[in-house]
Amino acid sequence: MAESELSSRCGFVALVGAPNAGKSTLLNALVGAKVSIVSAKKQTTRRRILGIVGRGSSQILFVDTPGIFTPRRRLDRAMVAAAWAGVADADFTLLLVDAAQKAMDRETAGIVGQLREQKRPALVALNKIDLIPRGQLLGLAEQLNRELPFAETFMISALTGDGLDRLLDRLAALLPPSPWLYPEDQLSDLPLRAIAAEITREKLYLQLHQELPYAATVETEAWEEQADGSVRLSQVVFVQRDSQKAIVLGKGGSRIKALGIAARTDLEQFLERRVHLVLFVKVREAWGDDPERYREIGLDFPD
């Protein structure tokens, strides 16, 4: 540990918000590395992801939760349950709000109502301030604080980094005195196999746009260290129907090849070494109702 236990602070901050509020972008910006996937599609974060940030003598443990929304499927219910579990376990909750919407949307209003009922320490950050004039932020901030008086209100842009230093400084000061829970060079508690699968899933979302919204998941089946210092990864893309498999493969395997190239580029950047990536596509009908798939992505299987 870099700091003495007597002066150190450590604690958990749950990141919550409506889908596409920018939680994953913010987590990656704070950590300084990609630990959570980013996509224009809503509800891409499925598991609870811990991002670890050292700030002076404080270690801030950010819990990136799935976006909170009205669940319709079993997987939706598991994701929303995971988000609220992250709130219950945290020292503080940081509500992230898309300031570009200019007014509080229905999903954000529902989250604020839940936080008010739980009476837990909460802060709010208006994100994407680079997209709108500063003067328009005050009305949204006042609306949010009328519904729930937040301990602190921050104006930030996860994309440009504006306001992030102040956010980190305040959170570091608010954390309880405690020894650090993780080594100072650790960025996340996710196994590398899981992060690798998330990186490939991000590329899958980016490649397929509207063709395969939420019917796919990715798992790392094998991780083999090579004698030359490289690593060989075998991953499986699970889909629910043969027609979806054809979409992922593409004509003559063109789509899966492009997916592999994009994923391998990011994996090599993250792992800082050469990666040999082998992708398979398998049909597993109704994987969204398979308890084993939920365990693989760190979710409880709801009844």
Image (tube, helix red, strand yellow):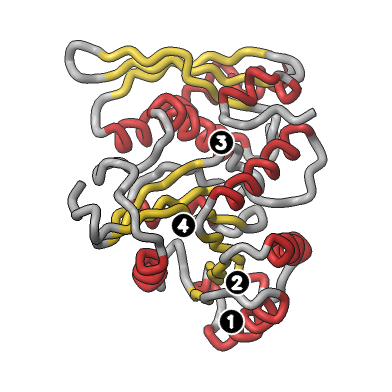
As displayed, is residue 120 above or below residue 207?
Answer: below
The residues tagged by marks 4 and 3 sit, at their Cα atoms, a distance apart of: 22 Å
Q: What residue is drawn where x is 58% and y is 15%?
A: 281
- Earlier-in-chain disc, 2 versus 3: 2
Front residue of this view, candidates 115 and 49? 115
Quarter of the image that includes the C terminus: top right
Q: Which residue is mark 1?
A: 137
- Earlier-in-chain disc, 1 versus 4: 4
Q: Which residue is mark 3?
A: 207
As displayed, is residue 252 above or below residue 194?
Answer: above
Mark 2 and mark 1 in contact (Cβ < 8 Å)? yes
Image position, residue 154 (x, y; %): 49, 74
Image position, residue 71 (x, y; %): 78, 44
The amino acid type, in three-letter code, at marker 2 is Ala
Q: Which residue is mark 4?
A: 26
- Earlier-in-chain disc, 1 versus 2: 2
- Earlier-in-chain disc, 4 versus 3: 4
The residues tagged by marks 1 and 3 sit, at their Cα atoms, a distance apart of: 34 Å
Mark 2 and mark 4 in contact (Cβ < 8 Å)? no
